[in-house]
Structure formats: structure tokens, C-alpha cells
Image (cartoon, grey):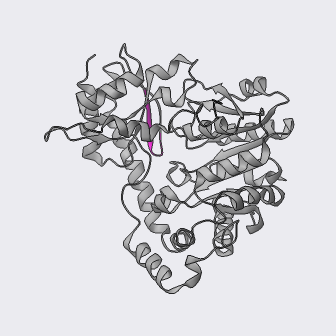
Amino acid sequence: MTRTRTAATFPPPVMEARRWIEGVTFPEDRPLINVSQAAPVDPPPLEMRQAMAAYASIEDSAHLYGPVLGNSALRSELASQISDHYGAPVVQEQVAITSGCNQAFAAAISSITDQGDEVILPTPWYFNHKMWLDMTGVNAIDLRTDDGLLPEVNAARDLITDKTRAIALVTPNNPGGVEYPAELLRAFFELSRETGIKLLVDETYRDFDSRSGPPHDLFAQPGWDDTLIHLYSFSKAYRLTGHRVGAVATSPSLLSEIEKFLDTVAICPNQIGQFGALWGMQNLSQWLADERREILDRRAVITRQLPKLTGKGWRLLGLGAYFAYFEHPFDISSDDLARQLVTDASILLLPGTMFMPDHDPAGKRQVRIAFANLDRNGITVLFDRLHALSF
């Protein structure tokens, strides 16, 4: 029997981790702490839900096909807000709406690659990016990062071949949490433009960046859309994970190619989700600012709690947005450690092996903690449990 590309692709990591807790009974005094998935667990604000419900009840078009590249009002609003956020002009024709940011990545990759082509991914990588490359027959070329989880431009240059079609970066990073400096992103942009490849920048977590002002100047570069493919998600900002609304910004000519993919896969983005995203952008700026402050406060709590773990040999590699990424001190592979933490400490987290190629042993020493759904007390309890571990 022929082995398919999906069969050769590893299982979805979050779903795999959920199977570890099936049938497990957690003690009443030690309930499960789930830090495996980087997604809001609370619904959108009530006012947004009420607006979406009214839209679904009153607006007939909420239940019909819409434009493949997304509704004009949302594309226009996003273009305007990108322009404001990055201090550079972006127009509606350079923006498309997708059914989630993962689809934006899939559509972009499908539009710029052929089977056997190559895309460079810094490690640790976002596993869904690696999965899509595997399923489409595109070779993921791993780019090792430095001690601060930042990729190096010269190392990337050495990996570029005549098969390379893009470099894909995520900032703030998933899984590492690190915020890529503006000058680093600019250097990768210049490298990509020089070598004629695309630079994909996934900023799903941009609304929780700790820095003030534009995080980079890529949109201000002349002809930026010939090189840059920018990805965004409304899921984290407005708690719209179940409605699947993402976005891509690039050249109108590439969007014409992306449109073919989108029309074939989903025809159009979810109408109610698009309305929710638009309503959120127009009405929830202060609410989102408060959400950002809360996430940054939880990040600060982790910094204060850190000595509990560093004193036991843990090493923090990256911290930001929704994530803390650690090197653990135990003589056990992280995939075995993660399974054992379920029963021994009532903790569900993801091992570094899910974010690294098999040939790189570093993943066996690393774990990702998605802390955004823990309050201050929850973070303290988590660190107390990790502090108490011994293997």
C-alpha cells in the first residue's frame, strides 16, 4: 500500500497530548493544570457575542457565501489598522481574510512552492507549519537558533539553495515566546529580497508584544509586498478561536494565487466570525489593551517565580506572549517527562520533541508552557509543583 504524505506526517501535538489525560483521575487536592494549548478558554466579551447574535439573526448574508478573499469592510479595517500599527501605508488590495491563521500559512505556502521545494524554519518550530510542509511535499529545512532562541541571518544564508522558496518566522514566537528584534527582522527581509525568496512573518501574537510602538519596519520598505507575506490571527486577540478568522497581507498578484487555494478549500471565511472580528476591531481597543496588560502581568509573575526552578537546574530559554520555554534538568527525554507529569504532578504540557526535528537532541531537554490561561495563583501553583519534582 502506498504511504501517503499525511500518513508520514506526525499526529497533531495538542490532540496527542489530550490523549495522555484520557482515563486519568486527578486528586481533588491536585487538579489538572493544562498548559498544553495556546488558546483562550473564555468566550468573547458579552457585548461582542450579543452583536454577533444580532447579526446572525437579522442579516441574511451572514448565512451565505461571501467574497473568497474576505469581506471588504473587514479587509479595509485591517489594512487601516496595520497602517496605524506599523506606521506605513497598507491598502485593502494587499489584505485577505482566511479561515484562521493556519489556513493563511497553508494558502501562502501552496501559492509559492512546488513538491520538492524548501522552506527554512527556525527551531524550535511551530508544529503546524512543519506539518503542512510535510503534507505538501515541501522540505522543511531546520535553522538552529542561538541561546536566546533567535535565528541568525548568516546561518540562514548558508541554507539557501535553488530550491528555497521562503523563510518562515514567528514573532512573538510560538513555541519560544521570544520577540524578534526589529533589526533582525529587517535583516531577514533584506536577505530574502536579495536572494529572491519570500519572507513569511507570522504575528499571531502581536497584540501581546511587550514593546511599545511598531515591532518592525517591514511594511515601510519600498515594494514590501514583493517579498513579505504577513500572517495574522483574530483568534487570540478577540477570543474567536472557534470562528476561524485569520489574515494574510502581501502583493495583490500573490493574493490572486492564494484566492485559488481559498476558493477550493473553504470558498470563503466564516461570515459571523468576520463580523465579530470587525466589531472587535472597531469597539474593543480598550478591552484588548487591558487583555494585553493582563498577559504581561502574568509574564511578570513567571519572572518573579523563576528562582524556584532555576535553583533546581531549570533554564528559561524564552518568555513572551503566551509562552515560557524551558530546558529541564532531568535525565529523561522531554516526551517521557511530559507523560509522567500528567500522573506525578497533574500537569499537561508539551515536550520540546514536538517542536524539533528528530535529529536534534535539544528537543529532548525542552518543554513549552502555555501560561496565558493561568491566573497569578495558578502560575504559582504550577511553579511549586515543578519545583517539587525529582526524577
Q: Residue at x 81, y 39 (%)?
A: 197
In the rendered image, residue 362, in percent from the top left (x then y), is placed at: 51, 19
- Image quarter for residue 337? top left
Range of residues picked out in magenta: 320-326
Magenta span: chief secondary structure = strand
Relative to 217, is 58 on the left or the right?
A: left
Q: Residue at x 61, y 65 (%)?
A: 269
Which residue is farthest front? 1
Relative to 208, is 74 on the left or the right?
A: right
In the rendered image, residue 369, in percent from the top left (x then y), is placed at: 40, 37
Residue 361 in view of the camera? yes
Which residue is farthest bottom? 58
Identify whether 332 is placed above or below 36.
Answer: above
Residue 214 in view of the camera? no
Q: Residue at x 54, y 84 (%)?
A: 59
Q: Residue at x 44, y 40 (%)?
A: 14
Identify whether 240 is placed above or below 332.
Answer: below
Viewer-closest of 371 and 184 = 371
In the rendered image, residue 8, in percent from the top left (x then y), is placed at: 60, 31
Viewer-closest of 122 and 101 = 101
Identify whether 133 is placed above or below 313.
Answer: below
Relative to 270, is 84 on the left or the right?
A: right
Q: How many marks?
A: 0
- Image quarter for residue 126? top right
In the rendered image, residue 154, in percent from the top left (x then y), is placed at: 75, 25
Q: Does 325 lie within the magenta span?
A: yes
User: In which quadrant is the N terminus drawn?
Assistant: top right
- Image quarter for residue 119? top right
Q: Does 242 lie within the magenta span?
A: no
